[in-house]
Image: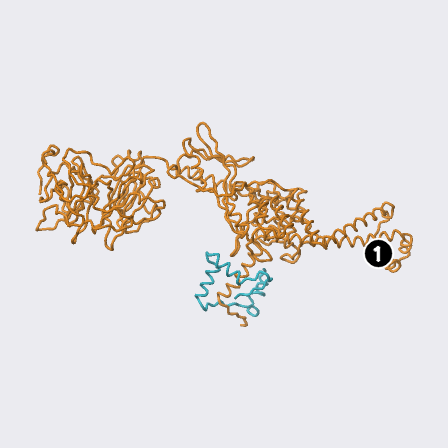
Chain colours: A cyan, B orange
Amino acid sequence: MNADQLWETTMNPETRTLIQVTIEDAALVERRVSVLMGDKVEPRREWIEENVQFSLEDTFTIE
Amino acid sequence: MSDKKIMMSLEDIMGERFGRYSKYIIQDRALPDVRDGLKPVQRRILYAMYKEGNLYSKAYRKSAKTVGNVIGNYHPHGDTSVYEALVRMSQDWKMRMPLIDMQGNNGSIDNDPAAAMRYTEARLSKISETLLQDIDKETVSMALNFDDTEYEPTVLPAKFPNLLVNGATGISAGYATDIPPHNLHEVIDATIYRIKHQHCSLEDVMVYIKGPDFPTGAIVEGKQGVIDAFTKGRGKVVVRSKVDIVESKTNQSIVITEIPYEVNKADLVRKIDEIRFNKAIDGLIEVRDESDRNGLRIVVDVKKDISIKNTLNYLYKNTDLQKNYNYNMVAIKDKRPTLLGLLSILDAYIAHQEDVVTKRSMFNLNKAQSRLHIVEGLMKAISILDDVVYTIRHSKDKADAKKNLILQYDFTEKQAEAIVMLQLYRLTNTDIVALEEETQDLMHQVEELEAILGSSQRLRKVIIEELENVKKQFASPRLTKIEDEIKDIVIDTEAMIANEDVYVSITQDGYIKRISQRSYKARGNWAFGKKENDYLLSLMEANTLNKLLLFTSQGNYLYIPVHKIEEFRWKDAGKHVSYLVKLNSQEKIVKAILVEDFTQDVSIALVSKGGQIKRTSLKEFEVTRYSKAMKCMTLKNEDSLCDVCVLDGHQAIILVSKLGYATLYSEEEISLIGIKAAGVKGMNLKNDEIISMVHFDPDKATSIVLFNDQGGLKRLHISDIPYCQRATKGTLLFKKLKTKEVYLTKAILADPKDVYNVYLQNGQQYEIAVKDYHYLDLQAGFSTYGKINVGDIQYIDDDHILKIGKNMKPVELEEVVEPTIHIYNERPQNIHYEKLSFEDFLEDFNDEDIEE
């Protein structure tokens, strides 16, 4: 990516979009992180089965 | 600032991003498609090579070129991952039917890497071409590549069930897959049977597919595991190496010719050699890897007199000579990761073939029909050739000629085009015959194809024919032997241990070591190695086959096979026992007993400081699992284990308390109880505690020696101590002083010939010879030790090693010429004690003054 491309797409304050990450419920975040990144596979698989739609192309419905 | 700002909670962001990532990894990276058994990178490699004409019939092409094509056209990822995938598809110890034919070093079963991609060359293997066959006939759906410049297949036509034949392994998010290779012949037969019998059972199909067929051969055990895997997708089988046992004059050898799938041979050889080097088992002489270009061969030389079966079982259990394979048949089916049984895999494959053959037939039909249409036009043109020529000659240009042909003779646009493009030589006679033949041929084809498309029966027949054809070309005999039962591995551990006489030492704090005979003999004047403030509890002659029982202050015991104890030199401190068995930090070792034979009819007596006493049969101390300390006496809160001894059924015991009281009774007074029990009251104590338990053979033993905390020592006749009931206060053993309280620290059985080592806190050692001290009666006070300062004594080594073996009893005192004391084994009502006299023994002693 060239510098001007980066400016256009990401850096320009006129057009860019920022996502501000918030933590409302620390316990919920903690649980989510340990499900998604933890050692146990089983909860992760369950989460994937519940939340990821394999049949649709590139659309995700979370929760 | 006009920033657009979106607020999102962390869990939502993570959920959304992880969802996208996991979907990608699952669908497009790590898991194979159920239809062609390929992961995207593999499919892209095969397709890229096919497109480039890098076929089996042509010369090899540099691997780097292929890798570049794959990355540049289809797979925007690392070159190493693409090259590794390419190499793996060429390895005939990973793939049952290699899909790539590689020229050059493509790695080895020892896991050494393939040569870099600039050195190796590759082409599609012959069987790969059947995976790609018909791909240009619109048989599979194509998708645009990453930069929308090319199309790539989403699946290959796959003319054989590659997923089962070559297997797969992969780890994605939440899902992993492990599918072993199977035999092509068997899989095709099963597929054909399934096509013919759509509702057949797994059993029927398993007539053909009996289990996995690894390229590395070996033996698979466990039919049930195969059935589980084929039913549910998960199941465990045992894969065992193929070995032969060869006897020679000097030794015997285990010859390994096939090893389990996915085992690194070099690691396996190294592991076996480590076992030899560490002497974990006895009898291994040498391990040699004799593999060469003709095949795999590992030779393990074993001593002549060793049970080779046992050795082999040990290797099966402790190395990858035997390994479990866990089926976990996950594949992408309808874009979804699915755990699949054998029948679902076959059905998915068959459905794919029906789809492919239908589409191909449609493609061919279209082609045949349009050709037929043209041929019909040409034939018609030839039949009115002169008119056609005239019309063309009188037309302005090509477009006009076509227009006129269509208008005047009713040709279609396509036919007209074909006519104007006709070369003049095609107008000869022979060509008309050829056209006629072609028409026939095309009509026949169309008929055939229409039949296939119109009847699922015909369609299936075509699929079967094609499968049969692949089978005929490529089938190879099964390499892996299947056995229904999993053989138990029985290891006689005793037989594995090198039988060696050694010394074993244990300190109070729990430092333990094994000292070889050689090191023991060479100890010279070196002090025994130990940590500061620790002291030697026992040093005993042992054999590696013996077991050591260590009793702790908290009423537990540790069971330690001597051969497990690490060897150290005499002057080394050794290692804390917790590397063998876990020990609580406050727990002290109270006593060590060495056992050769647990079947001996003896019992272990345990006494606590609080006066509880119990007896438990030795047999109960034998265990098979010993990683943890086990309870041998339940103790009340503050109480702790004080002493332990071995009784053979004819012994009597004396319990001695700190305040100087002693009870003496037969061991039969103590009931024989279970290993966890708390026991009974052994002595009535008042603000007092037990310091020693002395056991003796009433027919032989004569005297005991008491030590006190003031540096005093007293030797007295056992016969002076009256027999009493179990839970009584007992007899006072010395005269109480009014001025100060004297406490006993230890009581030991004494033979006139004994010499005791007394260890002082400053590390000095001092000898006390029993015969140096006269007998004193109960009312007397103490003698002094002599040169030793009061309070310096740290430990008295009473040297009575407890060893129980086949021909061993608790170490007996040497026979002494002294009248015996009779303690009846039956619980006596009235006991008569014979008074003993000193006279007989005076000669044994030096006439030294007895100091008060």
Left or right: residue B673 compared with residue B366 = left
Q: Give the residue furthest to the front.
A: B829
Q: Position of residue B416 (x, y in %)?
A: 84, 56
Residue B534 drawn above or below residue B816:
below
Q: In this orientation, which residue lies closer to the viewer: B64 or B645?
A: B645
Q: In this orientation, which residue lies closer to the viewer: B505 or B695?
A: B695
Residue B652 picture quarter: top left
Residue picked out by circle 1: B416
Q: In this orientation, which residue lies closer to the viewer: B356 or B26?
A: B356
Q: Is residue B225 visible?
A: yes
Q: Amino acid at mark 1?
A: Ala
Q: Is residue B786 visible?
A: no
- Density class for disc 1 (Cα within 10 Å; few <14, some 14-19, many ≥20) is many
Q: Position of residue B61 (x, y in %)?
A: 64, 44
Q: In this orientation, which residue lies closer to the viewer: B516 or B314?
A: B314
Residue B823 drawn above or below residue B377:
above
Q: Position of residue B431 (x, y in %)?
A: 85, 46
Q: Position of residue B650 (x, y in %)?
A: 22, 40
Count of numbered labels shown in the rendering: 1
Left or right: residue B209 compared with residue B793 = right
Residue B633 drawn above or below residue A30:
above
Chain for mark 1?
Answer: B
